[in-house]
Image (tube, rainbow, N blue to C red):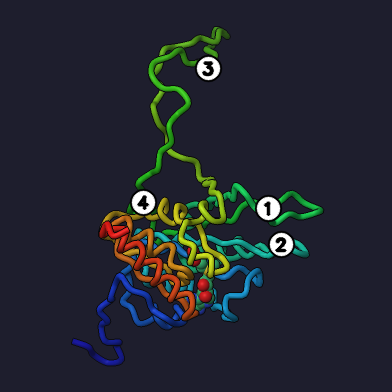
Amino acid sequence: MQTGDAKPDVLLETDQFYRGNCVPVMADWPPDCIDLTVTSPPYDTLRDYAGYSFDFAGIASELLRVTKPGGVVVWVVGEKINGGRSLTGFRQAIHFQDIGFVVHDVMIYQKKNTPFMRSNAYTNAYELMLILSKDGPPKTFNPLKVPTQRSGRELLTHNKLPDGVNKKKRGMLKREKTRTNIWPYAVGFGGTTTDRIAFQHPAVFPDRLAEEHILSWSNPGDLVLDPMCGSGTTCKMALLNNRRYIGIDIADEYIDIAEARIGAAMSRLAGLE
Ligand SMILES: C[S@@+](CC[C@H](N)C(=O)[O-])C[C@H]1O[C@@H](n2cnc3c(N)ncnc32)[C@H](O)[C@@H]1O
């Protein structure tokens, strides 16, 4: 039952896209309803996203409100470099912290191949991935592992003891270890994605980047949001990994691309392709 000025409860419809400005769209939702957001905002004036601008502070405060306690926001951000770096990602990280998010980590999205050369500086080959959590550390962390170079029992170098002799001891080397927070991806067709239609959007992030965050910070059945979903990469990878999703974009033409990608992914899941 509603009293006074309270908004009526809105049943959150999942596994769909919303067309519009994400700030008022999210403002209609109840608090604490999203497990994980994986998103990437427009980057300074680097690209023209069908002419739309965005309200960073409004998006940040709505994301804080709709994220569940212990939920995570992955914010992938590049910046303008000509004429000195804009430091947008750093400014945004500080703003997120100022409004109450925990800046759990600052990870690096390393681009293994990048065409953006600078004549007077080293070629920029990374973007920041801010890992923000609400009301404490992430409620879910499924660390991704990589194989170690060697494994099994072997002589390990031991620190020097007080007698000054560097003794070696037998120890067990593990088969795998947790990855570092620098994640490298090839970009372009085949690296970013093999969905040709995605490249009708000017700034797609890699399928695998979205997938690896989804696997790390959520569990099957969780609700994954991308409030600026562009070509729908996060939503597609959520679907393929048995999570529920919601995508929002202000540009109709990008939602059309996202819906086409989801349709193709559903056909793949149904074994039709
Ligand atoms: C960097 S792109 C996201 C690309 C996406 N990660 C992908 O893989 O395709 C940023 C997107 O934000 C959208 N956008 C900008 N302002 C918005 C707003 N206020 N609400 C919703 N979407 C917005 C743009 O239309 C653009 O598609």
The residue pinned by badge 3 equals 159
Q: CA distance from mark 2 to mark 3?
A: 45 Å
Please identify the quarter of the rendering in which residue 65 is found. Answer: bottom left
How dense is the environment of label 3, judged by Cα within 10 Å: few (below 14), some, or many (20 and up)? few
Q: CA distance from mark 1 to mark 3?
A: 39 Å
* Residue name at image x 55 percent, y 10 percent: 166
Task: Decide if ligand 1 comes within 8 Å of the CB at mark 4.
Answer: no
Q: Alpha-carbon neighbours of circle 1 within 10 Å: few (<14), some, or many (≥20)?
A: some
The residue drawn where x is 74% and y is 49% is 122
Which residue is labeled 1 in the image? 124
Callout 3: SS? strand
Residue at mark 2 to residue at mark 4: CA–CA distance: 32 Å
User: Are dots 2 and 1 in contact, CB under 8 Å?
Assistant: yes
Residue receiving disc 4: 215
Q: How many marks?
A: 4
Q: SS of the residue at dot 1?
A: loop
What kind of element bears circle 2?
A: loop
